[in-house]
Amino acid sequence: MKKTIRILGIRGVPAAHGGFETFAQALTPYLLARGWEVIVYCQEEGDGAMYESVWQGVKRIHIPVKGNGAKSTVVFDWISIVHASKHQDLCLTLGYNTAIFCALLRLKGVPNVMNMDGIEWRRGKWGLIAKAWFWLNEWAGSLLSNHMIADHPEIQQHLARGAAHSKMTMIPYGADRIDEINPELLARYDLKPNQFCVLIARAEPENSVLEVVQAYSKRVRGMPLVVLGNYKPDQNPFHLAVITAASDEVRFLGAIYEKDVVNALRTGARYYVHGHQVGGTNPSLVEALGAGSAVLAHDNRFNRWVAAGAGVFFSSIDQCDVIIAELTSRDDLIQQLKAAACEQFHAQFESDDVLEQYEKLLLQWLPR
């Protein structure tokens, strides 16, 4: 049986954008090793004709589009779906942001499994028109996909309002276990193991970055809070507010995409700060568990299920301040949380286990 899959909905591989790209970069070699042909649609900025290339065995279809914002991504998604609809290969669509276009796949009888991501229309960063678009596309994804993947039990519960349970499967994100700290990579940023904490998130209000920085800056901590992310205070008022609120102990390292460096920061940190308020199973939190990190997380049903006993949770700036002081002073608590992180990761989020679940599901939808 020929096993071919086309991956839609992401910017492409190798990963240089977000969680779905990182997931695709892990899934593609897994499938290739098991005899699949893997085709990934890749967005490029510019003009010109569509062209193909091969990256580590993955066939990439490059689609140039003007601009690099939301509109260009919508155009890219449409062109990708039109191209995929001309074939009868199984499609895996990562995200529902333009799910309405998948009507074309349904009309052409092309099987399409869709990862429904988080509840995008609830995110505070979007205006009314954008929220309406995402709400419409969430419903479109439920109706037009052949099968849905929910990355979290709460997302599965949410989707069950508009679709039968038989039409969805819960598969979380996975990650690789990281056991070793590379002190040389930490030294690049004048950091030492267990003598800093780290926050890795997009610089958006819903990720509690401002609240965490305000809490951390309430008193002297004796170690830096390292913040990763792309901050442009001269262009973005929220970014300016975060940087203005920061004490001298908050260090902004910018956006870092070097996997070894990010892994070293997670593994070497005393604890990992996860402020995400919306979404399902967040890849960054899973990767922190894979690094054996103690976790300080925003208190919501998504984070509590993922972090479980590896986390302590805050719901206000003052509460965050108190917990940070406790995490700074109590070695016993840190060790307890780190041990729980390893247990939770092994039980739920081992990469190979997750990828195996994906392949089993995809095999069910291969055209016969």
Image (cartoon, rainbow, N blue to C red):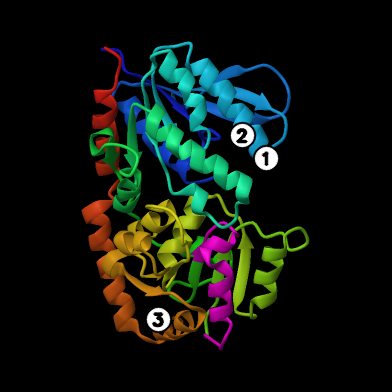
The numbered mark at residue 212 is: none
Q: Magenta segment: does it hold 215?
A: yes
Q: Pinpoint residue 226: horizontal percent, then vertical percent.
A: 55, 69
Q: Is residue 45 above or below residue 340?
A: above
Mark 3 or 2 closer to N-term? 2
Q: Is 358 on the left-hand or right-hand side of 81?
A: left
Q: Is 51 on the left-hand or right-hand side of 351?
A: right
Q: Residue furthest right?
A: 234
Q: Magenta segment: does it hold 202?
A: yes
Circle 2 residue? 73
Q: In this view, does 350 lie above or below 78?
A: below
Circle 3 residue? 327
Q: Distance between the residues labelled 1 and 3?
A: 39 Å
Please give the name of the residue rendered at 42% of the width and 44% of the height, measured from the top-left corner. 117
Circle 1 residue? 69
Q: Does residue 318 show up?
A: yes
Q: In this view, does 254 lie above or below 155?
A: below
- Where are the magenta residues, as a range? 199-221
Tell me which amino acid carries mark 3.
Answer: Leu
**Quadrant of res 368:** top left
Please give the name of the residue rendered at 57% of the width and 24% of the height, measured from the top-left corner. 78
Q: How far apart are marks 1 and 2 (CA)?
A: 7 Å
